[in-house]
Amino acid sequence: MGLTLLVVSGAGDAEPAGSATQPTLQRAAAEAAAGAASHSVDGYDYLVYYANLHSHTNHSDGGLAIERCRRPSLGPDGRLQEIAQRGDSGPAEAYRYALAQGLDVLVTSEHNHMFDGSSALADVPARDAKDRFAEGLRQAQAFNSDHPGFVAIYAQEWGRSAGGHLNILGADGIVTWERNRANALLGTYPVDVGDYASLYSLMREKGWLGQFNHPDRKQFKVNGVSYGYTPDGDEVMALAEVINSDAWSSNVTEGESKRVDYGGRFDTLLMRGFHVAPTSNQDNHCANWGSSAPNRTGLLIPAGQPLNQATVFDAIRARRVFATEDKHALVVLRANGHMMGERFSNRGALTLSVEHRSRRNRAVDKVTIYEGEPDIAAKPGRPVKPGKLRVVGKQLHLTFTPTSGRHFYYAVVVQDDKTRLWSAPIWIEQHADY
């Protein structure tokens, strides 16, 4: 399996890697490979698992064999020409490949408007689209039953490129705006294209989770505001991609060098008021799930709990997530003993601690801790006072007293080989110290 590290005592300081009283990273990985990943060892509270939370198969426009996988050409409108269901491999093949590649979790997230085999109005019966989605869910469930210790998740990527794509995790049916020529809905749940407020409300009602995929400018509009905030959206949208490898890379040796950085949009989401954790995925369209590049999304799951879809969703819901360009490394941010992803009230001093581990002994070259203040909104989607973001520290440990009000903090670590890691934020409400 992928690197599984034992880390971070919940309240005390973690011992240095290699300490005589704590397991080395090599020992941790060996124990995980031997099936010890579900057991707490030497007082550690969490295990780290590595995921790719965004990929495609031939249920939409992915799964293309390496030898024939090419980026689609641009159409008259300047957009990529989408090719639905022309790939060679489906979900089960993707999960099998990812398992062999060492991933712990793979999400295959098929475009919601391609289950009918088309990107436009179709003559296919609505039942065909629903059956294809149900078959994907069955393949994931069957793979999980046959491969304990690996988590296959079948999901959907909702939206159009112009408006913004997001992953919906945990849905039991297709959410769509598309109807066939007989006016039958090509899915189960109707939501108009671009109506993110209604989508967020549906997701909250159903208990689903979401990830903002490759966020770009002027997307995810609510009330005409890009990245418009709603309480329902804040509840369900737990993740946002901060950096991805090339979606159409055909590399199979983790050698893809192209990256697309969404850090500025991640900051925008935080300043809008969303409580999102950063992810780094591959958006694979070629049949190379996990092998195009070494970037991963890290998930912290309590030691003693099994790795399965429920515990993965629990980690996402709690925002115990980090993004990394190095699958052999991890980063954790804590504040006054609170784990990244948490929200709490604080009085007096705040101590921020950044913890970094590397199985390959990479050193920290640079660390930056960011402090932000979210928008003060009069109503959902309408920012009144723009959010603020600043660098508050450039060290692993920092103690200071924040100003009164709402703040978030997250850390970016640059290793000595220039690869980067992003911690999940911590959110606080600072009160005056009487």
Image (cartoon, grey):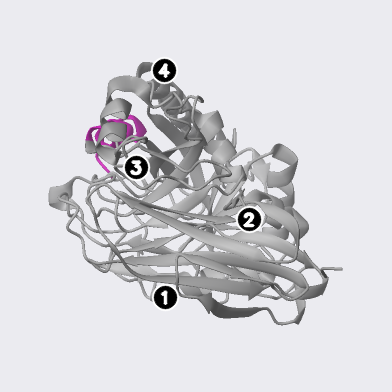
Residue at x-position 31% and y-position 36%: 20
Q: CA distance from mark 1 to mark 3?
A: 25 Å
Q: CA distance from mark 2 to mark 3?
A: 43 Å
Quadrant hosting residue 30: top left
Q: Which mark is residue 77?
A: 1
Total of numbered circles in the picture? 4
The picture places residue 260, in percent across and down from the top left corner, at 35, 69
- N-terminal of the two: label 1 or label 3? 3
42 or 334, nearer to the observer: 42
Give me the C-alpha separation between circle 2 and circle 4. Answer: 40 Å
Would residue 124 be seen by someone viewing this image from the given angle? no
Image x and y of residue 389, in percent: 60, 79
Q: Main secondary structure of the magenta part?
A: helix
In-front residue for pair 397/57: 397
Residue marked by disc 2? 336
Secondary structure, mark 2, is loop
Amino acid carrying label 4: it is: Ser
Which of discs 4 and 3 lies nearer the camera? The answer is 4
Q: Which residues are magenta?
A: 87-100
Quarter placement of the N terminus: top left
Would you say the residues marked 4 and 1 are in contact, meaning their CB atoms lie under 8 Å apart?
A: no
Mark in front: 1 vs 2 = 2
Give the residue pinned by disc 3: 57
2 or 3: tag closer to the N-terminus: 3
Mark closer to the chain start, 1 or 2 = 1
Q: Are marks 2 and 4 in contact (CB under 8 Å)?
A: no
Label 1, label 2: how many angstroms apart (C-alpha)? 52 Å
Residue 145 badge? 4
Amino acid at the residue labelled 2:
Asn
Tell me the kind of residue under disc 3.
Thr
What residue lies at 59% left-to-right and 33% top-to-bottom? Answer: 172
Q: Tell me how far mark 4 sits from mark 1, CA to CA.
A: 44 Å
